Image (cartoon, helix red, strand yellow):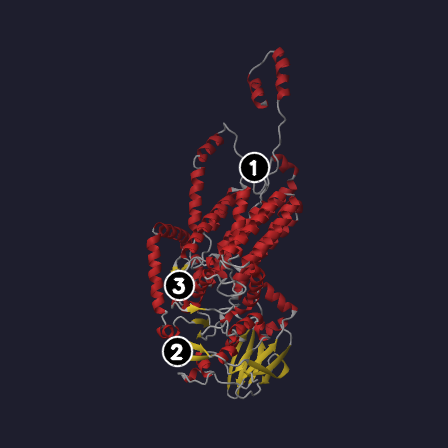
């Protein structure tokens, strides 16, 4: 009002009486001018707008006409980018077959943690929306669409985290140009969703409109994600703790009650809808932790050292950026909890992507879109740019702004470095289809268009796409057919003693899995003992087994589900072989097994010990191998150091073959030595051609490590032997 009243005074000379009487009244009536407060992180309302009436104002007015249509178009493109639809039909290989088994568990209300222990929860089948099995297709389709729509909305809303146009452009480009795994796996975008949830729940202010609704949606999806995969259980739990701390610190008790209430209620509802008993919650959590402990070593596989170095670049840059942020702790303290949560997300994704060589694509598919959130979000640009901070704040806080320049500039550099790292990784892993996206600039530019157009076309012509998937599934059923097995088994119960459960499900057999249904994942003593008890008990054991013995990753085969192997040999007998699969039938009334201790011996790395004779009984061996403190730290932060077993006799040897420390203490069978299907038949006294593939017996054994890994292991190894045979009353 002061501006409007004084403007005419600059243009006209007024009489003294008027200026002496009227003007003071006008000035006295004006309201005090409020200086704009410093912009809060994530508040879009504080962005400066040109004053009305100026040429810039007319220009922004014309642009405002296209703002809403532009945002709608951007949301549609984001949704088409994030939507996950079925792409392939399940076949008899391990991964698709296991995903089909997850749907089978969910449909038949298997109790997770009790009936089955896996790396997923009761909604684990939703983690793999790209494959079609025909068991729960509607649930997977609806989730793939709804999750894509929800993530697209929060990704669009995340533009308010960036205070410059450059930051927003980088954020959306990172989403569209992110590395997309070959089958469009859900892991990278579900982890991105958890990261976005942390930004909104921990940092966005209470004056945000519609915060209760958006927070409720986030909490509902977080509950569902936690019941899908064990890694999400940890992240959701950490985020819940941080929400409590943040709400108590800011005294937002209503938000705290609503957030925790929504998380708790939605988790209970989802748990009940999955047919799970509430008494199994602790068993589910314990089973997830047990599986993760064994998975860390069971599937660890060393790759190119350069890939590990490249993978360490984003966490290193994140640590450097946050070290600079600490220098301005008075401002950074508001962001401290979020930074800790971001570090937890990076660590979990790092472990998932780098514990096994070849899976780094999942890591980089997360890092590229996450990089703007980690390095640019909530950071103000330099003082000369379009900063929402008022001029008075810039004058009084010049030192703060200079520090902001460092953080923002380093953030821009970090995003560029992350992109260069993934380009270099794609060159190293040129044979890995997950990295084909970045192997040349043209592919990186055209792939998003092809992916979004494919999703749009499949949605518009869903009946046609569904028919194509059904036809492909029927073809895969024909290729996986085991007519002899199906005729012999009929409706009797059967389990897969191996790692191909899809073969049983594709043949429509009466599947009755053991608690850990995959033999190479049953590596911890607890999981192996549960499987052994399953086969030992007539009430739980299936009538038939379909055995497929095969070594993966150059591992020592007798370690896979080791405690269950003697029980299978004692309680089952081979019936026939069909397309390389061995069918076994349970022998009723077989006696239990008993162990007889034969002795132990302490040796060093590289030394050998002679194997004792056991006659017709089985020879069982265990090795007490321990990590040093440094070895335990390496195992926690990355992957365990590798060790190897060597078997030898006069004129022949086997190995070195990779051995798992997690299962060495529980032991493994050395006589008869079962490495393949021919060895399995030979354990029953049967001869199968070609006989040359049978693994011979050995007289001595020892353990080896790389000279570079000596600091990770204790120098002494205690080796013990047992004789296993039928128990006589």
The nearer-to-camera label among 3 and 1 is 3
Residue 571 drawn at (x, y percent): 49, 79
Q: Residues within 10 Å of mark 1 (few under 14, many from 20)?
A: some
Q: Where does residue 228 sit, x and y in percent of width and height?
A: 51, 58
Which residue is at the front of the view, 631 or 707? Answer: 631
Crowding around mark 3 (Cα neighbors within 10 Å: few <14, some 14 to 19, many 20+) is many
Question: Compared with residue 590, is residue 461 higher up or lower down, i.e. above or below?
Answer: above
Cα separation, mark 2 vs mark 1, equals 73 Å
Judging by the rendered image, the residue that carries numbered circle 2 is 577
| Residue marked by disc 1 | 46
- Label 1's element? helix
Residue 58 seen in this snapshot: yes
- Residue 64 at x, y = what percent? 46, 35
- Which quarter of the picture shows residue 350? bottom right
SS type, badge 3: loop
Label 3 and label 1: CA atoms lie apart by 51 Å
Q: Quadrant of the N terminus?
A: top right
Identify the mark nearer the N-term, 3 or 2. 3
Residue behind mark 3 = 90
Question: How far apart are the alpha carbons under marks 3 and 2?
Answer: 24 Å
Name the N-terminal-most of marks 2 and 1: 1
Foreground: disc 2 or disc 1:
2
517 or 475: nearer the viewer: 517
Q: Position of residue 20 (x, y in %)?
A: 64, 13
Q: In this rendering, which labeled residue sits more in front, label 3 or label 2?
A: 2
Q: Is residue 335 above or below residue 297?
A: above
Q: Assign a secondary structure to mark 2.
A: strand
- Quarter of the image for residue 641 reads bottom right
Are the residues tagged 3 and 1 within 8 Å (C-beta)?
no
Q: Judge left or right: residue 526 versus residue 444.
A: right
Identify the residue at horizontal 59%, vertical 63% (top origin): 637
């Amino acid at each position: 009002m002061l501006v409007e009243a004084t403007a005419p005074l600059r243009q006209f000379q007024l009489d003294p009486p008027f200026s002496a009487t009227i003007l003071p009244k006008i000035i006295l009536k004006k309201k005090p001018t409020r200086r704009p407060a410093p912009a809060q992180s994530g508040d879009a309302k504080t962005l400066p707008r040109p004053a009305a009436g100026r040429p810039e104002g007319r220009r922004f007015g014309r642009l405002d006409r296209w703002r809403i249509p532009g945002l709608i178009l951007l949301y549609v493109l984001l949704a088409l980018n994030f939507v996950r639809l079925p792409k392939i039909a399940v076949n008899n290989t391990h991964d698709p077959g296991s995903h089909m088994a997850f749907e089978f568990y969910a449909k038949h209300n298997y109790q997770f943690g009790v009936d089955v222990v896996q790396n997923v929860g009761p909604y684990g089948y939703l983690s793999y929306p790209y494959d079609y099995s025909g068991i729960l297709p509607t649930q997977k389709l609806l989730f793939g669409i709804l999750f894509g729509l929800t993530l697209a909305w929060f990704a669009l809303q995340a533009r308010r985290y960036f205070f410059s146009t450059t930051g927003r452009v980088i954020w959306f480009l990172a989403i569209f140009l992110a590395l997309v795994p070959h089958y469009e796996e859900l892991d990278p975008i579900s982890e991105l969703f958890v990261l976005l949830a942390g930004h909104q729940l921990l940092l966005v202010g209470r004056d945000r409109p519609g915060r209760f609704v958006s927070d409720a949606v986030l909490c509902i999806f977080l509950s569902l994600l936690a019941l899908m995969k064990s890694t999400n259980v940890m992240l959701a739990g950490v985020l819940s703790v941080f929400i409590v701390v943040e709400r108590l610190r800011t005294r937002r008790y209503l938000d705290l009650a609503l957030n925790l209430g929504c998380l708790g209620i939605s988790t209970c509802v989802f748990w009940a809808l999955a047919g799970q008993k509430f008494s199994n919650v602790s068993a589910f959590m314990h089973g997830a932790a047990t599986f993760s402990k064994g998975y860390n070593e069971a599937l660890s596989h060393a790759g190119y050292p350069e890939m590990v170095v490249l993978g360490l670049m984003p966490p290193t840059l994140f640590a450097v950026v946050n070290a600079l942020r600490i220098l301005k702790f008075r401002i950074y303290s508001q962001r401290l909890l979020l930074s800790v949560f971001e570090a937890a997300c990076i660590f979990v994704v790092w472990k998932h992507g780098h514990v096994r060589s070849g899976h780094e694509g999942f890591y980089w598919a997360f890092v590229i879109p996450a990089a703007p959130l980690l390095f640019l979000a909530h950071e103000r640009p330099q003082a000369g740019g379009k900063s929402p901070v008022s001029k008075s704040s810039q004058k009084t806080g010049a030192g703060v702004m200079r520090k902001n320049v460092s953080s923002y500039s380093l953030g821009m550099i970090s995003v560029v470095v992350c992109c260069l790292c993934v380009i270099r990784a794609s060159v190293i892993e040129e044979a890995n289809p997950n990295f084909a996206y970045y192997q040349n600039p043209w592919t990186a530019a055209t792939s998003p268009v092809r992916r979004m157009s494919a999703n749009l076309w499949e949605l518009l012509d869903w009946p046609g796409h569904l028919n194509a998937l059904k036809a492909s599934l029927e073809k895969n059923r024909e290729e996986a057919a085991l007519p002899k097995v199906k005729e012999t088994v009929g409706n009797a119960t059967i389990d897969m003693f191996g790692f191909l459960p899809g073969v049983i499900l594709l043949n429509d057999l009466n599947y009755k899995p053991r608690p850990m249904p995959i033999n190479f994942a049953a590596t911890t003593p607890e999981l192996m003992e549960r499987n052994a008890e399953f086969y030992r008990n007539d009430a739980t054991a299936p009538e038939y087994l379909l055995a497929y013995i095969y070594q993966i990753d150059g591992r020592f085969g007798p370690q896979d589900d080791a405690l269950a192997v003697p029980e299978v040999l004692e309680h089952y007998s081979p019936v026939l072989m069909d397309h390389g699969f061995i069918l076994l039938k349970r022998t009723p009334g077989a006696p239990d097994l008993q162990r007889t201790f034969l002795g132990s011996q302490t040796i060093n790395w590289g030394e050998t010990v002679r194997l004792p004779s056991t006659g017709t009984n089985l020879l069982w061996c265990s090795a007490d191998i321990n990590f040093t403190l440094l070895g335990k730290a390496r195992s926690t932060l990355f992957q365990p150091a590798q060790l190897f077993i060597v078997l030898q006799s006069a004129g022949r040897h086997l190995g070195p073959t990779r051995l798992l420390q997690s299962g060495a203490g529980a032991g493994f069978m050395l006589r008869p030595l079962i490495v393949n299907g021919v060895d399995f038949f030979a354990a029953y006294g049967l001869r199968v051609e070609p006989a040359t593939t049978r693994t011979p017996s050995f007289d001595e054994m020892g353990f080896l490590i790389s000279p570079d890994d000596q600091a990770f292991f204790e120098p002494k190894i205690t080796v013990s032997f047992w004789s296993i045979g039928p128990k006589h009353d």
